[in-house]
Amino acid sequence: MKLKEIAKRIAGIFLVFLILTLCWSASFYVTSWMFNYFGSEPSLYIKQIGTSIFGFFIFGSLMFFISRISNVRERQINFYRPIIVAMERMSQGNFNIDLTVFLKQVNSRDNPLFEVGQSVKRMAEELGQMEKVRQEFISNVSHEIQSPLTSISGFANALKNTDLTIDERNHYLTIIETESRRLSKLSDNLLKLTSLESDHLSFDPKVYLLDRQLRRIVLSCEPQWRSKEIEMDIDLLLLNITADEGLMDQVWTNLIHNAIKFTPQGGKISIVLQKDEDNEAVIQIIDTGIGMSKEVQMHIFERFYKGDKSRNRLVEGNGLGLSITKKIIDIHQGDIKVKSNEGTGTTFTIKLPIGGKQ
């Protein structure tokens, strides 16, 4: 038996003796006062019997009062137990809770406890959804990492074959190099996404020419769109904007690369910059590519979402580019929308406050 438990037991015994002593002392003084008040002087034996009976009465009444308080406390604990159990489960990562019984006991929407129960229920649902997103994110990251690693490992092992021709060896090395770049890009995008979602993001808005930035990004992508003989139509209003130029570089690069990627040989891409009546910069990136379904449009800005895998299996990417794009635009308090039909192309419309983030 531990020393702490022994000390607790001794303290308990001492407390009982103390209560008994106080009860019998109170009984002695009360019975003595009563005998004096009525002018009666019974024998010592009768006095002791009276003192003992009254002492038991005081002790019993005290114990009854304590038990009643204990029962009330126990009933209160039992009443709140569903909430307590729910919070304990949530602390352990189990967000599947049921507060139906508790909400029925409260039995009134005007009762503050009803709102407490509803709040806990909503919190559990939201945390459960966050946990689901977290697990999906980990699963997607694992898949995106495993795929290039498998290729690298397989072709690196194949290079051990001394009978390979120079062309075969170069082909395998090219695949290893491509998959390594894919891993590096995934790592960069994950770091960018983490940085954008952190509270310590370096956000440095400055005034600069948005049309000049768009022209620069288009020129940097010239080898890609020229190799596919894509017609590039540029219609840009001379416009100053207050924004983080480095972050916005990422936005335009992602969107223009996507337009080039999904536009077939000999297609067309249009980039338009205007100012609307709300004094916002409106940028449209329009392509004549493969387009996308309504369902794909609903999820296009989600992490790792790649749309129809069967149609895009030859297209590289890890599904993080548009998620990063939307996050950057949100940081600038802007808006991005997509409009598309399968087989007829896609239009991304971005609106940004000219004066910068308010």
Image (tube, rainbow, N blue to C red):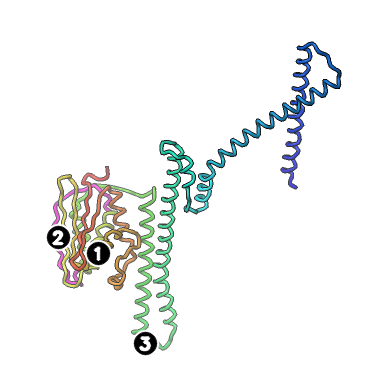
- The span shown in magenta is 225-246
Mark 1 and mark 3: Cα distance apart in space = 45 Å
Mark 2 and mark 1: Cα distance apart in space = 27 Å
Q: Name which quarter of the figure residue 67 lies in.
A: top right
Mark 2 and mark 3: Cα distance apart in space = 47 Å
The residue carrying mark 3 is 165
The percent coordinates of residue 289 (x first, y second) are 20, 67
- Rate crowding at label 1 as few (under 14), some (14 to 19) or many (20 or more) other CA atoms within 10 Å: some
**SS label for mark 3:** loop
The residue carrying mark 1 is 293
The residue carrying mark 2 is 234
Instruction: Tell me which amino acid carries mark 3.
Output: Thr
Residue in the foreground of this view, choosing between 117 and 12: 117
Residue 192 lies, with reference to residue 84, above or below; the image says below
Point out the tag, 2 or 1, that comes first from the N-terminus: 2
Q: Name which quarter of the figure residue 15 lies in.
A: top right
